Image (cartoon, coloured by chain):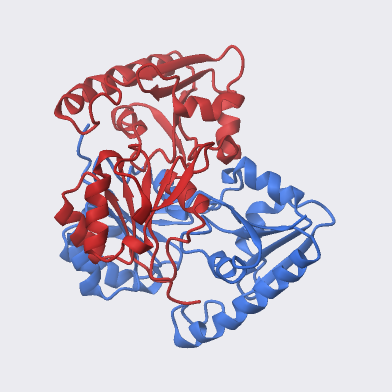
Chain colours: A blue, B red
Amino acid sequence: MKSTLHIVGTGPGDPELLTLKAARVIAASPVVAWFAKRGRHGHAARIAAAHIAPGTETLRFEYPYTTEIPVDHPDYLAALPAFYDASAITCAERLDTGQDVALLCEGDPFFYGSAMYIFDRLAPRHCISVIPGIPAMAGCWAQAATPITHGDDVLTILPGTLPQTELERRLRDTDAAVIMKVGSNLPKIRAALEASHLLPRATLVDRGTMPGGSVTPMAQAAAAAPYFSLVLVPGRQGLR
Amino acid sequence: MKSTLHIVGTGPGDPELLTLKAARVIAASPVVAWFAKRGRHGHAARIAAAHIAPGTETLRFEYPYTTEIPVDHPDYLAALPAFYDASAITCAERLDTGQDVALLCEGDPFFYGSAMYIFDRLAPRHCISVIPGIPAMAGCWAQAATPITHGDDVLTILPGTLPQTELERRLRDTDAAVIMKVGSNLPKIRAALEASHLLPRATLVDRGTMPGGSVTPMAQAAAAAPYFSLVLVPGRQGLR
């Protein structure tokens, strides 16, 4: 019987936003793996903790860098492929001895998730099952009580790392937007929202669905925000 | 004690993709409500069925039209506001007598969901809690084994109802795309994908995570598809 790599979305942060399927698969897996920043236990592991059975082998894959350099820095990008190679090999060793592995992934695994790099490496030779999760942005717009898209709205998901003129151009050409990877890009994002007359509609959400989560009108936001906070620009709210 | 309207995302279709929180709140609600097409029980109710306690009052809000006219037809759009008004009043009556109401919503409630129209009507006067759910698109890209966005990809969510030139223009200007509301728009969507050289990358997914779900390369798709099927165009898959 071939063993399976389960890539498990753990949702946006609230442990109760794990799916029934994720909880079942995590509890039944002899090996549970996750990614973590240096010196941190790992956010996905904390979300799933209650479902990891005693005696389960746990694999913590520590990123080569943590927030001391931005994740889009050339050194970071150069180190990551070797890191994903090694993590994939470690998973494959367990699969090859007949053990299922549950690889935890915050949010939804296939939506900007690190687990995709393991999927890309192991899919050609291994049986993989992907359990979708609630993306961080859905946790954020629920927490902010902000319906994001109605009717025939176009929604654009933008990384905050884009140049300001590019952010501005795309903000002018959409009904609704979500801006990811805010962090130190916040002043640039704010300027792009202002130039496209969307600042009054925009909301900054940090740690949506988590303890200490916050919702701030963009017009009142400070000069910087955590890297994984999001900016929400709801659509034109057409039909009511 | 003020009663609460819980707007509960039920996820993309597989009942196991309900969250632990959704299952708990549905089971504890004295009133469970949902939207349904004429003559159908209602998809959200089917997903949540195992968690609705015996003796729960159920409210089935039947849309004024079903698939005999498209949901973007002027007659449909004219009838909907009165329908949402009546549904909101029915929910408010239960809330005003001190009963919590769980309003079920397929996928994620704030992402093109009908429950937003109830939220818009009741939020000024009532206590509302929104439980996010896995959007249909996340169920579809998991089922299709298609990572949708890597790294700094821009993702554009497009309604298939847009004119062909507009679809084409937006497809040329994004890294990844999801096209919703496919149905009879399929030939137009296919032509827009072909013109933007994205046809070989595009996949049609129907009923993702549900029994009878299907995944078809767009290049091989038939001339029409169910209204709620989706087209996925994964991003450029930058860093590996």
Residue A84 screen position, x and y as percent: 60, 76
Residue drawn at 54 percent across, 17 percent down: B30
A23 relative to A198, above or below: above
Q: Is residue B206 left or right of residue B212?
A: left
Residue drawn at 57 percent across, 34 percent down: B15
How many numbered circles does the render carry? 0
Q: Is residue A145 left or right of residue B30?
A: left
Residue drawn at 26 percent across, 23 percent down: B68
Residue B177 appears in the rendering: yes
Residue B112 screen position, x and y as percent: 33, 40
A66 relative to B8, above or below: below
Residue A63 screen position, x and y as percent: 60, 76
Residue A211 screen position, x and y as percent: 55, 51
User: Residue A191 is drawn in which quadrant?
Assistant: bottom left
Seen from this angle, which residue lies furthest right?
A55
Q: Which of A29 and B66 is in front in this view?
A: B66
Q: Nearer the viewer, residue B38 or A61?
A: B38
Q: Which of B106 and A208 is in front in this view?
A: B106
Residue A221 appears in the rendering: no
Residue drawn at 43 percent across, 19 percent down: B95
